[in-house]
Image (cartoon, helix red, strand yellow):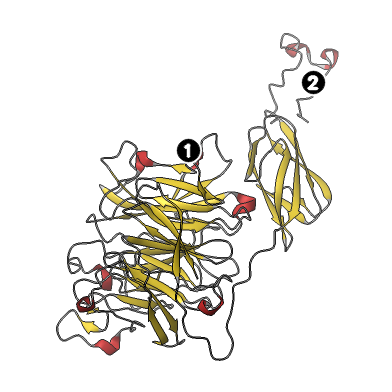
Amino acid sequence: MRTLPTCRPRHLLPLAFLLLPACAEPDGPETTATYTLAVTSGVNGSVSSSPAGIRCMPDSRCTATFDEGTTVTLTATPDSGYRLDAWGGDCTGAAGCTVRMTADRDITARFAQRQATATPCETSGQPPAIPAISLQEITDGLANPVHVTNAGDGSKRLFVVEQRGTVRVVQNGTLLDDPFLDIQDRVRSGGEMGLLSIAFHPDFASNGRFFVNYVSDNNEPNPRCSGSSRCTIVSEFTVGASASLEDSERIILEIPQPYGNHNGGQIAFGPEPSPYLYIGMGDGGGGGDPDGNGQDLTTLLGAMLRIDIDNRDSGRAYAIPPDNPAWSEVSGARREIWAYGLRNPWRFSFDPATGDLYAADVGQSAREEIDIIRQGLNYGWNEVEGDICYTPGCTLGAYAPPIIAPPRSDGWYSITGGMVYRGTDIPDLCGVYLYGDYVAGYLRGLRYDGANGYTEKRAFNATVGNLSAFGYDEDYEVYALNRGAGRLYKIAP
C-alpha cells in the first residue's frame, strides 16, 4: 500500500499559509512512498529477500514494505530433496525472481520433489579386466563441436557446444533445430579459439544459471574484452532473467590472452557441498611458453583456477574460496589459483565417485600427459614436459608427476582428456578413465591406482577422428565428439 503525506484541515493552518495548496507541508521533509511485498512460500522450501525484509519459512505467508523504486530480489531455498518448481503471481517461471517496487506485489513460490538422480557405479575388490568398447553414433550435423554435457535437471538433454558460438540441444537422440544459446556476435572462433565449454549450476533446475568460457577480441561485432584486444571470458547467463537469453550475460572473469592458442577452455563445477567453479587456463600460447606464465603465480594463465560464483568479494564478480592456497611466499600471487605449471589443460573432469580431478595437459613436442590435479601443487611446465625435462637441467622431483606421459614417438600429438566411466550399460568398464588423442583418433582407458600411476591400461580398437571432447549424460554414460565430422557418439559395449 502506498503511504501518502497527511494533510491538515485548512481552518487549522496559520493565516500565512492559507495561500498555499491545501496539502503543502513547506516546513516538513518529503514523505517517501512505500509499497507492500507479500510472499507465500509453499511446503518444502523457504524464501528470503535482498534487501532484507522477507524471510518466509515453509508453508507460510509474510509481508514487508519497501520504498518506492526499490529493486527486490527473492531467493528460494528448497528443502533437501526438493527444487523450486515455479514462481507465481508477480514473478513467473523457474529461474530468478526480481521485482521493482512501483506497486504492491504478491508472489508465490511452489516447490516440487527432485527427480531421483543416477548413482555412479563403484567397484569393490579386484576390478575386472577393462572390456572392449564400441561407438554408437547419436547424431551428426554439428558445426565443429568441442564440448558435451548435461544440465542435471532431469530433462535428459545433452548440450553440445559448437566452437562458432552456439550451444545445441540433443534430446532423445535428435538434434533440435533451434540453438539453446547463440553468442556468435561476441565470440572469436578459429584455431583454438571460440566458445569452448559450458557448465550448468548444480541448482540449474531452480535458478536457471549456467556459465560459459569463450575467447573474444576487438574484431567481433560485440566484443567483450575491456582491458586487452583478445581475452578469455567466463560469464554467467540466466534462463528467464531477460527477454533474450543472450542479453542476460554477466561477465564473471576476463583474462587477457597474448596469443591465439593455448586458451585452455574447460570449466566445471567441483564436488564440494556448495560447488566451486574450476577453470582450466593454458599458458597463453607461443611455443615453449615464451612469457613464462606456467611458473608465474601472478598471472591467471597456465593454471587451474577455483572460484566461488555464488558469492562476491569486494571489487570482484566472484569470491575466492577460503581454502584456496594463499601462495604467501610470492608477492602479488593470485589466490584464484588452485594449482599451476600447466601448458594447455584442454579438457578436465571430476570422477563423481571419488572426487579426483583428472586433467589432460597437451604437450609441446615430446610428451602428452594426464595429471591428477590437487590443491597447491606445481605440475612443472615449462621446466618439465610430462615426465622429462623441457628446460635443460631441471629437477624433475620438484614437481608433481603425471600418472601417464605418452610420447610423441608412439603417435601421440594432442591428448584429449575424458571421463571416468560411472554408468551401468557396461558394468566391467566401471571406474575406467577414458581418454584419447585429437590427431591420432586413439581411444584409451586406464584404472588409476590412487597414487601416481595406474593398475591397468587398454588400447581400444574403436577410434574417433578429431576427438575434441568426452562428456556425461545424467546417467554417467560417456559420449565423445568428432569435431571435424560434426558427430556425437556414445561409448557402447
Which structural element holds mark 2? loop
Query: Could you give the CA–CA distance between mark 1 and mark 2, rounded to whole angstroms?
Result: 46 Å
Task: Judge whether 213 appears above or below 71 on screen.
Answer: below
Quadrant of the drawing holding the N terminus = top right
Task: Judge whether 222 appears above or below 487 on screen.
Answer: above
Tag 1: amino acid: Asp
In this rendering, the count of numbered labels is 2
Q: Quadrant of residue 398?
A: bottom left
Residue 338: x and y, percent?
A: 41, 72
Residue 97: x and y, percent?
A: 65, 43
Tag 2: amino acid: Cys
Which structural element holds mark 1? helix
Q: Earlier in the sequence, mark 1 or mark 2?
A: 2
The residue identified by callout 1 is: 247
Residue 452 left/right relative to 231: right
Residue 324: x and y, percent?
A: 46, 72
